[in-house]
Image (cartoon, rainbow, N blue to C red):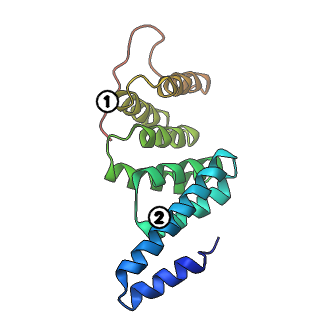
Amino acid sequence: MKPGFGVWVARCLRLVGARGLAARLLTGAVAGLNARAERWLAQGRFAEAAACYELVRELAGPDPVVLGNLAACYRECGRYAQALSCCRLGLSLAPDDPVLHNNMALCLEESGHFELALEHYARAMAAGGANPVFAMNHAACLARMRADGSGGPPETGAREVPLAM
C-alpha cells in the first residue's frame, strides 16, 4: 500500500519548512490509516492491515499499540520473525504492556519456544489483571508443551514462572 496524496504533500511541506501544516496533515493521514487498519484487522484482512500499520509506524514513529496490532497481523500471516521484532520494540517502549507480552508469547509458542512463551504469558497475566484470555493461553501452552513431549511442569502443584527476559 502506498501513501496517499495527503501524505505526500505533508512530506513535501515538512521538507520545505512548513512543519505546522505538515503536522496537521500527517495527523489526519495517520488517523485515517490507523482506522482503516483497525477495520481490516477486525475483518481478518491481516496482510492489508499490516501494510496500513507499517505506514502508520513510518509516519508517526513507534507506538506500542500500533506495534502490538502489527505483531498480531504478522503472526496471523505466519510472519513470526517480524511479529517478534514488533513485540520486542513495543516492549522496549512499554515493558509492562500485557497485550504485547501475550503477542510475544503466542509467537514464541508457535515457534516451539514453550518455556519463553510461558514467561511472557506469566507477564501478561501479572500486568493484565483478570483478563481470562492470558490465563487460557498460558494453560493451552502448558497443554501443548505436554502433548508435544516437551515436558513442562508437573501436573500437580503450582509452578513459579521466572519473569526475566
Q: Is residue 3 visible?
A: yes
In the rendered image, the vertical position of residue 75 relative to residue 123, given as above or below: below
Q: Is residue 150 visible?
A: no
The x, y position of residue 155, in whole percent, is 48, 11
Residue that appears at 40% across and 61% down? 62
Residue that appears at 44% across and 7% down? 156
Q: Secondary structure at mark 2?
A: helix
Rendering quarter of residue 148: top right
| Three-letter amino acid code of the residue under disc 1 | Pro
The x, y position of residue 150, in whole percent, is 53, 27
Furthest residue in direction top, as rendered: 156
**Would you name the residue on which mark 1 appears?**
162
Between circles 1 and 2, the one closer to the viewer is 2
Q: Secondary structure at mark 1?
A: loop
Disc with the residue nearer the chain's start (1 vs 2): 2
Residue that appears at 69% across and 47% down? 44
Number of other residues with Cα within 10 Å of mark 1, as a class: few under 14, some 14 to 19, many 20 or more: few
Residue at mark 1 to residue at mark 2: CA–CA distance:
32 Å
Report whether 30 appears left or right of 123. Answer: right
The x, y position of residue 79, in whole percent, is 60, 54
Residue that appears at 32% across and 45% down? 95
| Three-letter amino acid code of the residue under disc 2 | Arg
**Would you name the residue on which mark 2 appears?**
57
Report whether 70 appears left or right of 88. Answer: right
